[in-house]
Image (cartoon, rainbow, N blue to C red):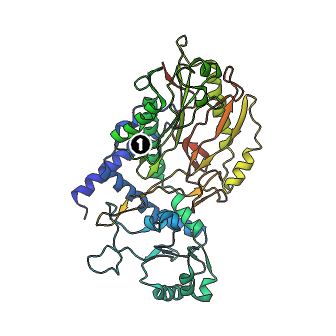
Amino acid sequence: MKNQKQIKYKFFALVLLMYISLIAEAQDKPSMVGQDIQNILPMRQRVQIMEDFLKWKRDHVLPAVMREQGVDLWIIRNNEADLYYNNEGPVFTSLLLANHEGMTLPSKFAPPGSQRIPSFLLFYDTGSEIEFIEPSNYQEITELVNTYSPKQIAIGAYNNQEMSNALGKKYAARSVDSWTLGVRWLETMSPDQVVIYRYVQGMANDIIAEGFSNAVVIPGVTTTDDLNWWFRHKYLELDLEVENHPSVIVKRRPSHIKKYQHIDSVDKFRNGRTVNGVNVTIQRGDVISLDSDIMLLGLVTDSHQHAYVLQKDEKEVPQGLKDALRIVNEMQDLFAKEFKVGRTGKEIVAASEKIKVLPEIIETELGFHPPPMFIRRYLKGGYMFSHKTYVAGMTSGPGYYPTSIVTNDHNLYYNTMYAFEPHTSVAVSGWGEHGLELGIGQIAVFEEGGLRYLDRPQKTKWHIIK
């Protein structure tokens, strides 16, 4: 019987989901600046909601992806991840049994009082349900395989000779690499995750909107390092985790680079822009660009947004920049149409290269990757698993840092998420031969209706600093 704390939490979570669902109806409407940031959950509720995500996925996603891949037996070792994950692979960690607080249950073969995790996890599809067994050793795996007589077995390809020996010649011949199955388990999102991801992206948008305002930026005084560290400290104040240092850069007209060279040397700009780590004073007429993320509820944003600093004689963003933003969004929508189920990352990029580029565009390139995610699970003694984020699924690659669970050879499936971040440079009068690059990065979900932006912050409007 549920205790009072569990009932209280369930009610709280239900109210949160109802609230988020109402906001989610406004997917393509202007972002509700300031709304999401008012609803940051305490850490305990965050972990509990993340555990609910995994429970739902175990009940619904696990059988679906095993049947999709034609696998009726999946055996996972606790040491099959490669060294990139220090043998704490996100597949294994996410499938461990745990309580509602994220505390993993020890192996049933562990000595009394020990927190030792299982050596193996075995999932068998009976046809009506997925049966879970924890084998004690390879000898028991041999016995179970002979009992079940599976048609296809998924096992890890890394350092798997002992597993192949345990399967025996007959069943080793029926084994396949579990790489795709593991990726499908990780990348497939629950309906609640998609809804809550919009809330997380909305929160990131709220923070960026505040940072890209006169509440934070004073033209001629505030530097890019000032703004960079303002974002870091804001995340800290809000109890939000981050993995990466924000990237704040300035894009400046050639004439203004010369105008302000007594403050910031011309050498700080290349093709009209700085790079992260080069500190310059933000001046009127500048475009400020941010690349940053926040981590919440196992979900990580990847936001690229832009602000314009009005000149003294300007009351609004110049028409040339308004047109540039419109053109960039039109190009992104054309790219988004190339997301078609079954295509690989390579095929999506190849198709995007055949799109007729809009006349004002100097150059454009489609870029995307699965957004990083993370798991909050612990041994009862307090040790935390998978403290790093993981990236699993299909990418445009090969520019994205390669890991063992992301590739541009993977296929596109429904209910998967992407950090969608094409980069486009537009010819704008006065901005030089290289034009103005406006890559707008945001989180999107691929559904049966196509690629859908979760909370599109700059579809029509610039952030404005007066």
Q: Is residue 402 left or right of residue 432?
A: left
Q: Is residue 114 left or right of residue 250?
A: left
| CA neighbours of label 1 inside 10 A, class few (<14), some (14 to 19), many (20+) | many
Picture coordinates of residue 351, whole percent (x, y): 74, 48
Q: Nearer the viewer, residue 395 or 202?
A: 395
Residue 452: in sight, yes or no? yes
Picture coordinates of residue 184, whole percent (x, y): 56, 62
Q: Is residue 170 above or below residue 283?
A: below
Which residue is found at the position 56% from the left and 85% from the top? 167
Residue type marked 1: Ile
Numbered disc total: 1
Q: Is residue 381 above or below residue 212?
A: below
* Secondary element at image label 1: helix
Q: Nearer the viewer, residue 123 or 229?
A: 229
Picture coordinates of residue 223, whole percent (x, y): 47, 28
Which residue is found at the position 45% from the left and 39% from the top? 204
The residue pinned by badge 1 equals: 20
Instruction: Identify the image quadrant of the N terminus.
Output: bottom left
Quadrant in the rendering for residue 178 = bottom right
Picture coordinates of residue 325, whole percent (x, y): 62, 28
